[in-house]
Image: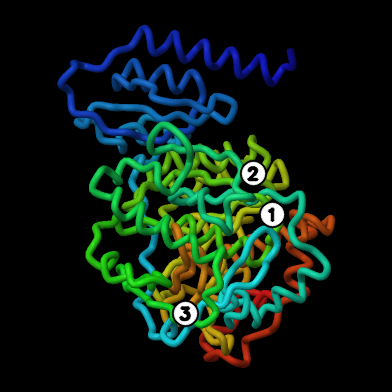
Amino acid sequence: MTIEKALVLFCRVTIIVLIGIVSLTGAGTPLQELVVRCSIEELRQLQIRHGAAIIDAIPASGGYLIALPSRINPAEIKAANNAILTSENFELGIDEPFPRSDAARGLQWDMVPFHTSNVPRFYLNQPSATNIEVLKAHRLSTGKRSVVALIDTGIDDTHPVLNKIVVKGKNYVMRGAASEWNDPRLDQRHSTVFELLQSQSTVFDLDFSQAPVFPVLRGNINVLFARSAYASFRAMPLPAAFGHGTMTAGIVHLVAPDAELMPMKAFDADGKANLWNLIRAVRDSVDMGANVINMSFSAPAEKETAVLFKTLAVDYAKASNVVLVAGAGNQNQDIEVLPAAIEPVNAIAAVDSHDVKASFSNYGNYISYSAPGPDVITTYPGTFAMASATSFSAPFVSGVYALLKEAGSDGKLGRAQIERGSDSIEELNHPSLKHKLGKGRIN
């Protein structure tokens, strides 16, 4: 047994003992959850002084998810020992896509072969793909032997474009597979939606070259249909973030079609996740063999929370040379968000087809690169969709890293190659954005 394994075993045994000797003040006591980073001795003091109970632990990194009586002010913990890092195990949300455009109108289904499946030509030839010369890149690399983890709402692993490249992931919101469909926010009311969307997948086996696309607006996402059933879909109930993970997966697949996709379902279909599950998802992605981790979400970059996420998650990925990519957010502000602003995460802003900053995209000195973001066409459960967000910019960069992995470049070397290959866009944008859209637009 190695020293490291022995330490982990000792910590786990110690935690079990500590849980056994400390209890909360009563079964009906209102509780709060905190994420903390501390030593075993500091943890013992938290239990003795504040009645803390351990819910989950990453003992090798000193990370713990604890429950405290709600009457305890976390500031009391910091006052007693400033060395302990604490953060509420707060809920994060996926950024809503930016309001729709009418770009989906006039499209026609025209299916063409693309690696393991048939796809509509408008997926391959969309401006987001042609601007960064995706198909040209495939002459050199397609992402073989790369694994991209997507911390998101899961992936529709029955989608005919994705089903051959989705590998086993992990579901943090309920038991079972990390599928878009396996979600606590979905119930019997949604069975009709499932059947309708599944029926759409038959278009990938038929000749629909002359069939028009019927866009249906759900929130700010245009879901694309090839059948008249689109009218029924318009009135069907669906949670707000349903499909988001399948959409980010489809963009990675567009860029790196032979990369494997690992769904890490930390968000439910309402687009909600908590801090601890996101930390766990990053670490589990590394342990399960991911080379790249895509994080299409953002939250306010509170200092203590950012330090906790860095020490418990980002540093763990960095130590294994795993690349982290995150969207910059959709508030059109010069603000830092978590996890994009945490070094060495690749922070991605969005630009339009003219390489001008997208009207919704955040920006700032921490941005690494820009990538297409408006009117991106990608997979959606059972079909395709069009939407705009930095959520959909980040997976373009994750896909590029997957291409570089196959070519033998990852980590720092891959980052240097992306920087050298990016197109300068400063002269196309307002002078106030100088150095705030990264090293350029990926290419």
Q: The N terminus appears in which quarter of the rendering? A: top right
Residue 213 in sight in this render: yes
Q: Separation of disc 3 and disc 1 at Cα?
A: 31 Å
Residue 317 is tagged as 2
Q: Which mark is residue 165?
A: none
Circle nearer the viewer, 3 or 1 = 3
Label 1 element class: loop
State the SS at label 2: helix
- The colour scheme of the drawn protein is rainbow
The residue positioned farthest toward the front in the image shown: 207
Left or right of 321 in this view: 184: left
User: The C terminus lies in which quarter of the figure?
Assistant: bottom right
Q: Is residue 401 left or right of residue 304?
A: right
What residue sits right under mark 3 in the picture?
Answer: 211
Circle 1 sits on which residue?
Answer: 259
Residue 204: percent from left, percent from top: 55, 64
Measure how far apart labels 3 and 2 are at the Cα level.
Answer: 46 Å
Above or below, 416 against 2 in this view is: below
Percent x, y of residue 399: 66, 62
